């Protein structure tokens, strides 16, 4: 009995209880933010469990308090798998904190400890977010990879430099076809007119990948 009393006194001491709340809040919050395969959640649950154990051994925490806490924990777990836009997470947090206050022998003192724990947890969580921002849950909702050439992305080539250049149709343009321009095979299109194979053409317009040509009458004369 002496061991139980000493353990209860240690766990319910304001400093110890505040540390346990800090561990609980940080562990669960970081699990929700970074998905650490349950390790952080386990640490968070352990912190809260020891907090409740202390007040349970002291005769203050009852089934109702644990039930409210359990419901909060369940809601937070559901937040991981159900897209609720944070609603389940908020309700879960309210239940968790409500259970913490209900289990204490002095709710006002518990509120102070919870407030201090929240402030310390916010500092630690902010540091973790800044340090490991590339691993956060928000990266599931934004485009993380830049579309760069060295990652295999090739944008449409800018062919505006072809305007005014001349070449030769190597297929009939009806109105689309292929022409040789400055030694390069280019897919081209006319404005609707037909140009036979072997005719000289000139580029009159470029719109993205669309290269518009017409017959170069001056060279055909």
Image: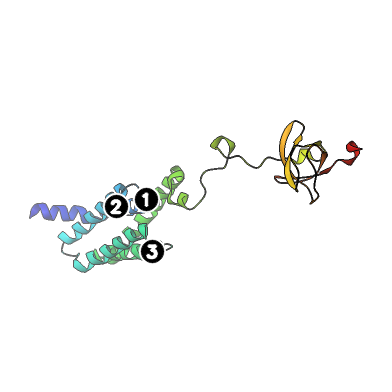
2 and 3 marks in contact (CB < 8 Å):
no
Pick the residue in front: 88 or 83.
83
Total label count?
A: 3
Q: Circles 1 and 2: CB distance less than 8 Å?
A: yes
Q: Is residue 185 above or below residue 211?
A: above
**Quarter residue 219 falls in:** top right
Q: CA distance from mark 1 to mark 2?
A: 9 Å
Q: Work out whether 147 lies above or below 117.
A: above
- The structure residue drawn at horizontal position 43% and vertical position 62%, both measured from the top left corner, is 85
Question: Could you tell me residue 68's position as x and y percent?
Answer: 26, 66
Secondary element type, mark 3 = helix
Q: Residues within 10 Å of mark 2 (few under 14, many from 20)?
A: many
Would you name the residue on which mark 3 appears? 90
Mark 2 lies on residue:
44
Residue 132 rendering spot, x and y as whole percentages: 43, 43
Say which residue appears at 36% left-offset and 66% top-offset: 91
Name the residue located 44 percent from the left edge and 42 percent from the top edge. Answer: 131
């Amino acid at each position: 009995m002496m061991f139980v009393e000493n353990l209860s006194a240690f766990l319910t001491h304001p400093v110890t209880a505040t540390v346990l709340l800090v561990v609980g809040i940080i562990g669960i919050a970081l699990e929700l933010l970074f998905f650490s395969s349950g390790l952080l959640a386990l640490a968070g649950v352990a912190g809260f469990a020891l907090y409740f154990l202390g007040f349970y051994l002291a005769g203050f925490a009852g089934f109702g308090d644990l039930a409210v806490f359990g419901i909060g924990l369940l809601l937070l777990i559901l937040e991981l798998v159900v897209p609720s836009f944070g609603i389940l997470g908020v309700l879960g947090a309210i239940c968790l904190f409500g259970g913490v206050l209900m289990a204490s022998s002095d709710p006002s003192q518990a509120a102070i400890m919870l407030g201090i724990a929240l402030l310390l947890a916010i500092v630690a969580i902010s540091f973790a977010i800044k340090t490991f921002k590339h691993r956060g849950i928000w990266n599931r909702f934004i485009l993380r990879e830049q579309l760069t050439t060295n990652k295999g992305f090739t944008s449409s080539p800018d062919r505006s430099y072809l305007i005014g250049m001349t070449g030769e149709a190597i297929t009939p343009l009806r109105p689309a076809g292929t022409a040789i321009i400055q030694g390069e095979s280019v897919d081209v299109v006319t404005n609707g007119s037909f140009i036979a194979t072997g005719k000289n053409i000139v580029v009159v317009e470029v719109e993205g990948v669309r290269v518009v040509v017409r017959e170069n009458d001056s060279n055909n004369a």
